[in-house]
Image (cartoon, helix red, strand yellow):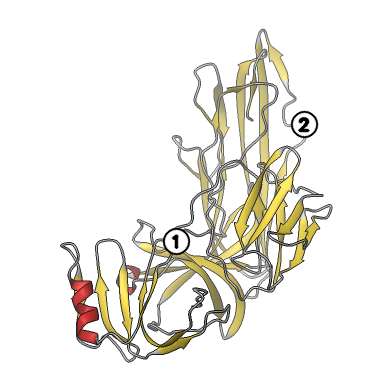
Amino acid sequence: MYQQSGIDWDNVKLVLSTGDPNTNNFKPDLQPKYLNFVNTYYRKTSAVNRTNYKYNPTIRSVSGIVTDDSGAPLPGTNVAQTGTTNGTTTDFDGKYRISVSNNGGSELQYSYVGFNTESIPIHGSMMNVQMESNNESLDEVVLVGYGTQEKESVVGALAGRAAGVTINSESYNENVEAKQESLTNTRFEIKKRYTIVSNADITTIEIDKFNLPASYQHYAAPELNENVFLTATVTDWERYDLLQGEANIYFEGSYAGKTAINPLATTDSLEISLGIDPNIIVKREKKDNFKSKSFLGGTRVVAKAYEISVRNNKSSVINMVLEDRIPVSQNKDIKVSDQETADAAYDEKTGILKWKLELTPKASVTKNFSYEVRYPKSQNINL
């Protein structure tokens, strides 16, 4: 926590509130691909869940990759810290690194010819950006500082809210005096008083601590990302009042990097991406000369086939979910046929293919699928 109100908070009582900030999910989210007619200037797009973060003043250096809407790197993208002359450009692979000035603005600005300029709060040491036209708003986390107000009056102010507000007036734990659950958020009244100077210095306040049992599995969607992600699934997570945001991950006693926690999911379990496992190799290749592009009267025929190879280089057995997709038509003049899905679980409505794999140490497996698309040769489609 930090504050820059211009007034030092001396020995104040704090109430921390869980807002509704949005966050990224580093694990790729495979969506159905619907086919329709487009003009000759169509650019391929991929579904990306875009959210922003609050400014984090502790960040001193930021690195990442800038891509276009198809996921291809954008070399030469200008990256600059707002309010300063501090800037850099991405290299041939779209990668960049920039040092953050303490006296500069709280955002990085990304600009490239032909794309809308993106301004994103400096929220983490790794910021990967996909240039696109739409931005989602950042929901604030509310922080309320009380002066020397007595406990009874603070709790009373909280109680006079809308119906549905629940207050635990007894001591919640060793750090929290009272916990208030309202219709939209949860507030914690902190026992200890704090002095917080108006600057960018961070004060860490522990609210609670949990040990969460979890099950682990690997996940890959190689059309979007050929890396394999280790994920942890936590059940009965609703009772913990977890806050959305960037989190530091310590796995088996070692720092494993950063991830994002999204407790607003409507599923029965909370899935957390623990990062990339370099010991699991996935490769997706398009089969050459499967069927050449051809014409049948006024119809263009396009046949596609892919082979996905997975190898477990670890010394232990792994469970893994592998996903890919076959496009789904949204137009009666676009026909998708001859779907060959082998042993995959295939959802015809979404086109999603799913394999559940169990790989022994050093084992490999290969999966194949194919399909055919027919559409009027005078049209272009987003294939």
Where residue 228 sits: x, y (%)?
62, 61
Front-lying residue, 307 or 299: 299
Please give the name of the residue rendered at 77% of the width and 35% of the height, measured from the top-left corner. Answer: 288
**As shown in the figure, which amino acid type bears the numbered disc 2?**
Asn
Label 2: few (<14), some (14–19) or many (≥20) C-alpha neighbours in 10 Å: few
Q: CA distance from mark 2 to mark 1?
A: 48 Å
Point out which mark residue 219 bears.
Answer: none
Check the image and name the residue furthest to the right: 92
Residue located at (66% from left, 72% from top): 314
Image height of 22 relative to 3, above or below: above
Amino acid type, label 1: Pro
Q: Which residue is under mark 1?
A: 21
Q: Quadrant of residue 160?
A: bottom left
**Image-based side of 90 in relation to 357, left or right:** right
Decide: marks 2, 1 in contact (CB < 8 A)? Answer: no
Specify the quadrant that holds the C terminus: top right
Whether residue 166 can be seen here: yes
> Residue 212: x, y in percent?
40, 78
Which of 55/295 is in front?
A: 55
- Left or right: where does residue 339 sit relative to residue 235? right
Coordinates of residue 358 in the picture (x, y in percent)? 54, 62
- On screen, residue 196 versus residue 68, left or right, reads left
Q: Marks 2 and 1: which is nearer the front?
A: 1
Q: Residue at x 18, y 72 (%)?
A: 159
Q: Secondary structure at mark 1?
A: loop
Q: What residue does disc 2 label?
A: 289
Q: Which badge, 2 or 1, comes first in the chain's sequence?
A: 1
Point out residue 189 in the picture as x, y percentages from the top left corner: 31, 81
Residues 223 and 359: in front is 223
Q: Which element type, helix, strand or loop, lies under badge 2?
A: loop
